[in-house]
Image (tube, helix red, strand yellow):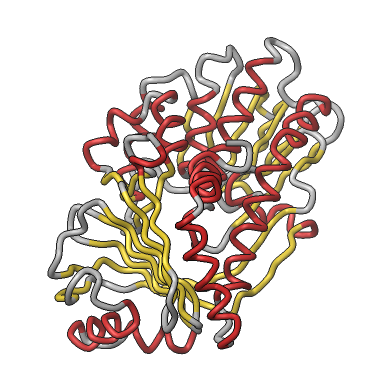
């Protein structure tokens, strides 16, 4: 017989964990399923760009105090394009916020969330991989593999988070960008001064995010080029990076271990089904340009938890609640997907006339405060910000 709960969350990554924390005082029985085994270390060297709005959500979840000392604030973002004029600078002072965003290590974020979960009433079950999910008007059932033993969990709601979109692959659209992201830490002669850079090149954007060690680099390139860059010795790699990025932070003098990740847009056309729904990377995986993917997923988790709590003791997986949630999230989700996808389509074409038009656009954006403020607020809070 299947174990019965109110809410099951499939995926113990940051979005799933945040959703679980949002429900800790809801009065519902909540179980978070994590595929990693009990006590397994989180070994992920990536850095995550947290918007100012995401920082506020983590504060409301009781997580920010454990993360703040390790998070580097971003006070300025400089946007430019290679081989062309035109640039714009976004400033926290102009936006009247303490920081436009923050850069935190993925591992530090996961540890902060795990620490908060340990102090909550949420049941976290490690070593449980979800193999299948089905749902009807009355109940949703998850088939779980726990150390080679299959069991079933029945719930009034199952939320699939953090990359579980393959469980509903028939309704997932994919666009291969034919790009890869090379990710690593780098050190430059000049300190970061709480600046972040987004530089568009014909192959894709190159981002530098400030960290305690120097910079976190996300270098988008054609797959073959990214693989070639990954195996260069450090000196040659730094020289290639210098040519592509320029001298805004002085010479690059060191580079860490490199990782290459393929890039594609994936999004579920039907993220809501009977007593099940997708949030975070399960609902949409975006291009890393402008660092919007995780922040959108965190807003998914926060708004869903709020919607469930607002309905009180009513059915947390009822069609009325889920459809209302999706209707409220549609604008932010659609606009953010279009925003990141449009940036790649607009800036990754090396056409002289288009280069000039983009340069004029960047210059105009920096010279028109209302337009710049609109962009900043959307980056910090999403389309409904």
Q: Is residue 352 above or below residue 330?
A: below
Q: Is residue 85 left or right of residue 76?
A: right
The N terminus - image quarter: top right
Q: Between residues 16 and 266, which one lies in front from this camera angle?
A: 266
Indicate the position of residue 197 as horizontal and vertical percent values.
35, 63
- Residue at image x 13%, y 70%? 189
- Residue at image x 41%, y 45%? 50
The C terminus - image quarter: top right
Q: Is residue 245 above or below residue 265?
A: below
- Residue at image x 46%, y 71%? 205
- Residue at image x 36%, y 47%? 91
Indicate the position of residue 131 as horizontal and vertical percent values.
65, 50
Q: Between residues 356 and 190, which one lies in front from this camera angle?
A: 356
The answer, for residue 41, to whether it is visible in the render is no
The answer, for residue 134, to whether it is visible in the render is yes
Q: Is residue 354 left or right of residue 251?
A: right
Indicate the position of residue 32 as horizontal and vertical percent values.
53, 33
């Amino acid at each position: 017989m299947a174990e019965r709960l109110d809410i099951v969350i499939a995926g113990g990554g940051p979005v799933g964990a945040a959703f679980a924390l949002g429900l800790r005082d809801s009065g519902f029985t909540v179980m978070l399923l994590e595929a990693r085994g009990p006590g397994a270390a989180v070994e992920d060297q990536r850095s995550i760009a947290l918007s100012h709005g995401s920082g506020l959500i983590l504060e409301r979840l009781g997580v920010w105090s454990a993360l703040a000392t390790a998070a580097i604030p971003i006070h300025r973002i400089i946007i430019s394009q290679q081989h062309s004029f035109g640039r714009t600078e976004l400033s926290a002072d102009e936006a009247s916020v303490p920081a436009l965003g923050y850069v935190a290590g993925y591992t530090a974020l996961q540890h902060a969330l795990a620490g908060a979960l340990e102090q909550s009433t949420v049941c976290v079950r490690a070593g449980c991989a979800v193999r299948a999910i089905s749902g009807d008007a009355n109940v949703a059932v998850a088939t779980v593999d726990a150390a080679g033993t299959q069991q079933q969990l029945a719930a009034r709601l199952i939320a699939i988070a953090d990359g579980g979109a393959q469980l509903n692959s028939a309704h997932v659209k994919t666009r291969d960008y034919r790009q890869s992201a090379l990710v690593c830490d780098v050190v430059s002669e000049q300190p970061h001064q709480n600046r972040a850079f987004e530089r568009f090149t014909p192959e894709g954007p190159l981002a530098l995010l400030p960290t305690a060690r120097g910079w976190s680099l996300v270098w988008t390139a054609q797959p073959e080029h990214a693989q070639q860059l990954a195996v260069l010795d450090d000196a040659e790699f730094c020289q290639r990076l210098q040519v592509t990025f320029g001298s805004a932070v002085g010479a690059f003098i060191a580079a860490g271990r490199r990782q290459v990740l393929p890039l594609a847009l994936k999004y579920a056309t039907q993220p809501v089904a009977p007593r099940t729904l997708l949030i975070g990377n399960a609902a949409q995986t975006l291009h890393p340009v402008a660092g919007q993917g995780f922040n959108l997923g965190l807003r998914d988790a926060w708004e869903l938890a709020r919607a469930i709590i607002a309905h009180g003791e009513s059915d947390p997986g009822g069609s009325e609640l889920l459809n209302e949630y999706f209707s409220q999230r549609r604008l932010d989700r659609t606009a953010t997907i279009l925003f990141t996808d449009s940036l790649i389509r607009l800036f990754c074409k090396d056409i002289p006339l288009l280069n000039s038009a983009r340069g004029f656009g960047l210059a105009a954006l920096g010279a028109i405060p209302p337009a710049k403020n609109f962009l900043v607020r959307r980056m910090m809070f999403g389309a409904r910000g």
